[in-house]
Image (cartoon, grey):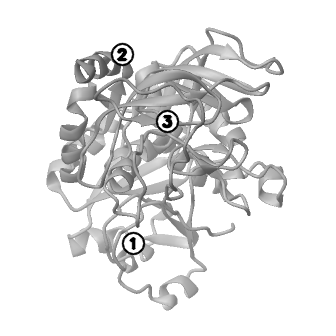
Amino acid sequence: MTPGRPVPPPLAHPIPPVAGAAPAAAGAPAVAAPDSGVRAAAYGAVSGASGLVPLTVARRAPKPDDVEIAIEFCGLCHSDVHATRGEWGVQTYPLVPGHEIVGTVSRTGSNVTDFAVGDRVGVGCMVDSCRECESCLDGLEQYCEKGMTGTYGAKDRRNGDAITQGGYASSIVVDRRYVLRVPESLDPAAAAPLLCAGVTTFSPLRHFDVEEGDVVGVVGLGGLGHMAVKLAKAMGAKVVVFTTSESKVAAALELGADEVVLSRDEAAMAAANRSIDLIIDTVAAPHDLNPFFRTLRVDGALFQLGLPSEAMPPVNPGALIRRRIAYAGSLIGGIAETQEMLDFCAEHGVVADIEMVAAGQLNEAYDRMVAGDVKYRFVLDTSTLQAAAEEADA
């Protein structure tokens, strides 16, 4: 295993002026891109305190290797909240978030033969990488040594250094190499969170070669945690959920967990000693990992997926040494692995549990995400964007 560390998407940079771009409709600030092809209705932030407001995004015309996508649904990720509110450092606005995108192909470039108009496709957390480094050549584009290009808030080096704008929009243009095929058997709305939450949990499970007979522990039962439960069960593992909340016991069992351990119960944690092969930790708040290390067997591993904003309590090296335990991290997945995950989910009938929201409900959804009031992932219905933009223009 090669430990990594989850990191936030690249921060945004100033939006460069675009010569000859058509003016935005009144009341809807324009987010420019070079060689714009269509103007997409969108929602995004214009400051850290603005909330999400109607915007107009100028998308580039498809180049020979590009795919233009009419977006149907876009999942809401907690990282969207951090980015738009400027909680991950200095941000430049306007910024359209969204990296759990599902839609249909509306136009293709002249070199594109693997996608056709009408195909259902997806776009995850990245839209480019250097394509030359060892990581990229190994299909690990998320670990690109020159830095992957995030789906929003990143400098797009191949397109005039424009800042990428994400999926809370009616369309997007992406190089075909970073477009995923969404199996028709998957509900497109419920499949959207698979492009981030799904692959983020799938990747460490695959890296550890989880199979029937393994015991997987899942810490936390939110957007990531509920996907970890579903995927680990589909791989044949016994799943044990660790939670601090008695109210989540029934929910964990409904998702397919075989057992639930209240992590604040010292006796319950002691009873779980040496019983787990792999732990997927999805909690994004500071918490003590040492009690969880004691539940791992020899050669077990704990993968940290949650990224707390404050320092974590120190790890006791002795807990790792005495059982040859690995403490690792994992960041989304490469393009090939993300496609593998989508195909696996189609084969096993795995999708996210979602609540659909309209554009006008996005700010409320953000507040509810922060409060933990969602089971388990919000998804934006982008058909509601145009009406909101038209109203803003009036």
Q: Nearer the viewer, residue 201 or 355?
A: 355
Q: Residues within 10 Å of mark 1 (few under 14, many from 20)?
A: many
Calculate the distance from the C-alpha at mark 2 to the C-alpha at mark 3: 20 Å
- Which quadrant: the N terminus? bottom right
Marks 1 and 2, the one that precedes in the sequence: 1
Q: Amino acid at mark 2?
A: Ser
- Which quadrant: the C terminus? top left
- Secondary structure of the residue carrying numbered label 3: helix
The residue positioned farthest toward the left in the image shown: 247
Q: Residues within 10 Å of mark 3 (few under 14, many from 20)?
A: many
The numbered dot on residue 383 is 2
- Give percent across and percent down for residue 164: 55, 43
Would residue 57 appear left or right of 78 to someone viewing this image? right
Q: Amino acid at mark 1?
A: Phe
Q: Which residue position holds label 1?
A: 292
Q: Which residue position holds label 3?
A: 194
Relative to 335, residue 342 above or below: above
- Camera-side mark, 3 or 1: 3
- Give percent across and percent down for residue 160: 68, 45
The residue positioned farthest toward the front in the image shown: 20
Relative to 68, residue 130 above or below: below
Quadrant hosting residue 125:
top right
- Camera-side mark, 2 or 3: 2
**In this view of the protein, can residue 129 be seen by the observer?**
yes
Would residue 254 appear left or right of 166 to someone viewing this image? left
- Give percent across and percent down for residue 334: 67, 46
**Residue at position x 76%, y 48% from top?**
139
Quadrant hosting residue 284:
bottom left
